Amino acid sequence: MFRILLIALTLVSAAAAGAETRVPQSPAEISLSFVPVVKKSAPAVVNIYARTVTQERSPFAGDPFFEQFFRDFAQPRPRIQNSLGSGVILTPDGIVVSNFHVVGRATDIRVVLKDRREYEAEVLLGDEALDLAILRLKDARDLPYLELRDSDRVEVGELVLAIGNPFGVGQTVSSGIISGLARSGTSVGNERGYFIQTDAPINPGNSGGALIDVNGRLIGINTSILTRSGGSNGIGFAIPANLVREFLAQARAGNREFVRPWAGMAGQSVDADLAASLGLDLPQGFLISDLHPASPFARAGFRVGDLITHVDGQEVNSPAEMMFRMVVAGIGHKARVTRLRNGRTKEIEVAMMPPPDDPPAEETELGDRTVFPGLKVARINPRTMLRFGLPLSLDGVVVTEPGPYAGPAGLRAGDVIVAINGEAVERPRDVRRALTRPGRWLRIDLLRQGQRVSLRLRL
């Protein structure tokens, strides 16, 4: 029996050695080798070397009193930060996707292909919250590239490969499976994301690299790992290809900032207790708890207490998942949203639109005759609500940039100014007026992340 098995294995190995190199077409072929997939896909994965040059600011710069005495003290010196990551070529003319944390603030970007060709690159579009960036390679043409797969059709258990440059050792390929989908409890960038989970080893330097299927199609962009030691523990996360597709579309359209559709609503996931109170058999959906009057959902007939179960046929069970589905649907399109109300379901088309600048934000920068020159404030409207994550019910004035004086005094971007020296603030001009004629003391009442804060300053 052992001799028969040995002969069978020998025949399989011989057949594999003599076969033409091609992409595996069945699980049996995949079990023999990933070589054909790697040969097809690896040339489209690049190494990225990014350098950021910043000027260290003197602690006395801009101070009208101390600057004159310490003019030659702590002169600004350039500070150079180097970062290493990976990227994926998406088009033959040199459009590359990577992570924002790799290239987002870089002043010099060098991209090296697997065949050692090098290109300079520039960032076309970046978003820190989504941790994505689109690059253009200068004077590039006829490059290898990866096809984007519909990531909504990816299933748990699929075989995948992760390609990148871990620890700067050179291009490396690791294998694994899809471990989970719709992972929205992980924070990347500065907000909760929506990710594909894999056990394919991902390490520092893999960021921005490719997660591909057995046909060499791009499933996602490797972004982060969940680790306590700094190494890969078999829990890696990738940004789904469908989000990359929308990001690429906006970059090609010439957008300098990524525009998200505005929901104009707040809501929550449904747990077991809430499901029981709603008469549901199972916890599911996204429950609307607040709606802005100008929300496209309000205009489409939704109201507080409605349950959203699907968007474009895909389940939604969390705020991050709801936002992801809207982004993937795309600005200017209509999404098919399934609503559950009083036990009845209905599919409704909702327009995916950017947040309206209505009423006008009236963003204002304070001048030299005020207490805080350089302070920028704006009126709260849907656009500033989305920008700073403000509650839908808020009205008044928000700090957009604290500037060189208000920042050290304690003001932060996103603070809502309620009153100055006891006088209510409703418009940016109220802030300018109050800070132009201060007394010996200045009191600013704020709302910061839902908490009331009072700053008291002596002038």
Image: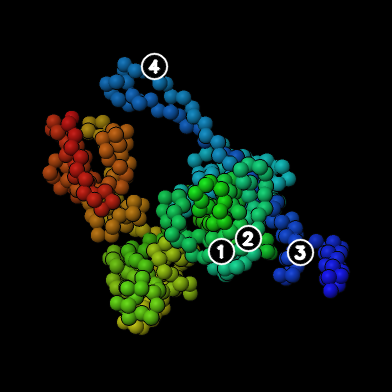
- Image marks 2 and 1: residues in contact by CB distance under 8 Å: yes
Q: Given contact means CB atoms under 8 Å apart, are the residues at marks 4 and 1 in contact?
A: no
Question: Which amino acid, mark 1?
Answer: Ser
Question: Could you give the CA–CA distance between mark 3 and mark 4, rounded to whole angstroms?
Answer: 68 Å
Task: Count every numbered label the image shows and give the total.
Answer: 4
* Residue identifier under label 2: 176
Q: Residue 408 at what x, y percent from top left?
A: 29, 34
Structural crowding at the residue carrying mark 1, measured as other residues with C-alpha within 10 Å and reported as few (<14), some (14–19) or many (≥20): some
Q: Earlier in the sequence, mark 2 or mark 4?
A: 4
Q: In the rendering, which numbered label is found on residue 179? A: 1
Q: Distance between the Cα atoms at labels 4 and 1?
A: 58 Å
Question: What residue does disc 3 label?
Answer: 32
Q: Nearer the viewer, residue 333 or 234?
A: 234
Residue placed under numbered mark 4 in the picture: 72
Q: Nearer the viewer, mark 3 or mark 4?
A: 3
Q: Amino acid at mark 3?
A: Leu
Disc 3 residue crowd, few under 14, some 14–19, many 20+, Cα 10 Å: few
Kindly report which numbered mark, 2 or 4, lies closer to the viewer in this rendering: 2
Q: Position of residue 12 (x, y in %)?
A: 83, 67
Q: Residue furthest bottom?
A: 344
**Image-quadrant location for residue 339:** bottom left
Mark 2–mark 4 distance (CA, rounded to whole Å)? 57 Å
Q: Vertical placement of 353 versus 1: above or below? A: above
Instruction: Please identify the residue farthest to the front as the structure is shown.
Output: 1
Which of the marked residues, 3 or 2, is nearer the chain's N terminus?
Answer: 3
Identify which amino acid the numbered label 2 is placed on. Gly
Name the residue type under label 4.
Asp
Q: Residues within 10 Å of mark 2 (few under 14, many from 20)?
A: some
One can see residue 367 in this view: no
